[in-house]
Image (cartoon, helix red, strand yellow):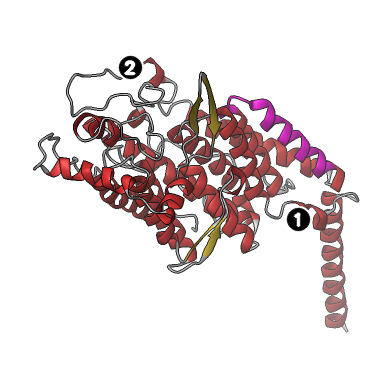
Amino acid sequence: MHREKQKQFLIKMKLSSLLLFVLIVISACGPNHNQEGLDAYFEGSISTYNRKLTDVIVADIFTPPVASRIYAYANIAAYEGIRFQDDSKQSLGGQLNDLDNLSKPEANKAYYYPLTSLVAFTDVAKSLVFDLELIDNMQKELLSDVQEIGIDKKTYENSVSLGEKLGKEILARASKDGYLRRTALPRFSISDDPGRWKPTPPDYMEAIEPHWRTIKPFVLDSAGQFDPGLPTQFDSTESSKFYKEANEVYETVKNIDSAKLEVAKFWDCNPNISTTNGHVMYFQQQISPGGHWMHIAAQILDEQKAGVLESAETMSLLGVTIADAFISCWDQKYKSSLTRPETYINQYIDQDWQPILQTPAFPEHTSGHSVASSAAATVLTHLFGENYSFVDATEVPYGLPPRSFQSFWGAAEEAAISRLYGGIHYRPAIELGIQQGKAVGSYIIKKIKSDK
């Protein structure tokens, strides 16, 4: 009899505990907390954020290296905000150079981590662009939508507060990475040396980001860690190897067919092309090379209906990789400071020759497209597999039809060779750039782990 009463007592205690737990959950969420509606709203949100960020980056006319830095920091913030959704995921704090341990949720407080991710992403992004009002308005609109859908007040406040803390901590790293200091460094000096880079037509712009190699890498030990080696030694004699490399560019453009022309234009990704019509000059803005690959990833994530956590994990790893790829590439660019094909060909082969694409305003070696694209392909292949077929529609908003690829490497190799078709790179810059980007991507995959 005593045992029977004890058993009934234990059952009552368990039921009471269960009831108390249910009441706590209900009170934490509140009567207006629409979990299902919120989850549906945040589906595909990381891709959406990045597309909206791209619109601002394009309008602000950021150079490719600067654009890569913006994508990296914003997506680090997005990942740090959502990673708490899964206890097996670890922070990038302590893994990335000079990014210390970041804030964590407080015990016994309710959070909605997709909202935390949104706040962290937009807080970081609006601090790195010129037109911060566009990002700020995007954030306000999204926050308004969340409240309209229905979210518990305390959960909302906790989530926003954590996102803001993470954003500030990530921006603290950005403030010390050398970006601000680089503007105080000496301007690039033009030399009479015929082998050194000089400004090119039609704008004869100053060298873009001559001190980008001084930016603190996210993962690499240093900007020169994966140096690709020097270009072919400059030589103007017709029997020289360098002349033959320049002549290959000349002949490729002179005899280009429609298929190669389409490839060159599809991968142009020059953020600011100038066009002169009579006495009038106007500019056309486009997506950057890094932005192109971020959009490829966003498209794949949408196709797979990936969750917010998986999407943030992918975009943060890709963003960091592309950013370090540009730092690595720019290190050799300004070490060798090699003249561009347009300058050489006009001087030694044909003074009236013009490339198909507008020559970017920075030295030749190595090809930024080749480095960034091969680094990105290395990461995406690691995440999605060797033979992932996809249709790349990134350039559709810029008036170009989509292109189909059988793999990420197929796209990267096409992006690389497009620079020869466009008349703006010698072959060694392309081939060594591919090797350089692959080394950067492979290293980052080994170093950065999101799983504990």
- Residue 388, position as x, y percentages in the image: 49, 67
In terms of secondary structure, where does tag 1 sit? helix
Q: Where is residue 441 in the image (x, y as percent from the top left)?
A: 37, 52
Q: Front-most of 5 and 114?
A: 114
In the image, is residue 300 above or below residue 277? below
Q: Does the magenta stretch include residue 142?
A: yes
In reply to whether residue 104 is colored magenta, the answer given is no
Badge 2 is on which residue?
187
Left or right, 238 with reference to 245: left
Relative to the observer, which residue lies in front, 441 or 108?
441
Placement of the N terminus among the 4 image quadrants: bottom right
Amino acid, disc 1 = Asp
Q: Residue at x 49, y 55 (%)?
A: 450
Please tell me how crowded label 1 is: few (under 14), some (14-19), or many (20+) other residues with Cα within 10 Å.
few
Secondary structure of the residue carrying tag 2 is loop
Check if mark 1's residue and mark 2's residue have beta carbons within 8 Å: no
Residue 445 can be seen in this image: no
Residue 258, percent from left and from top: 43, 54
Q: Report the magenta residues as a range.
A: 127-147
Does residue 213 appear left or right of residue 291 in this picture?
left
State whether the magenta stretch is mostly helix, strand or loop.
helix
Which circle's residue, 1 or 2, is located before the other in the chain? Answer: 1
Q: Which quarter of the picture shows residue 180? A: top left
Residue 199 visible to the viewer: yes
**Residue to which mark 1 is pinned:** 39
Residue, far bottom: 1
Q: How far apart are marks 1 and 2 (CA)?
A: 50 Å
- Residue type marked 2: Arg
Tag in front: 1 or 2: 2
Residue 129 position within the rendered picture, expressed as x and y whole percent measured from the top left: 57, 28
Q: How packed is label 2: few (under 14 Cα within 10 Å), some, or many (20 or more)? A: some
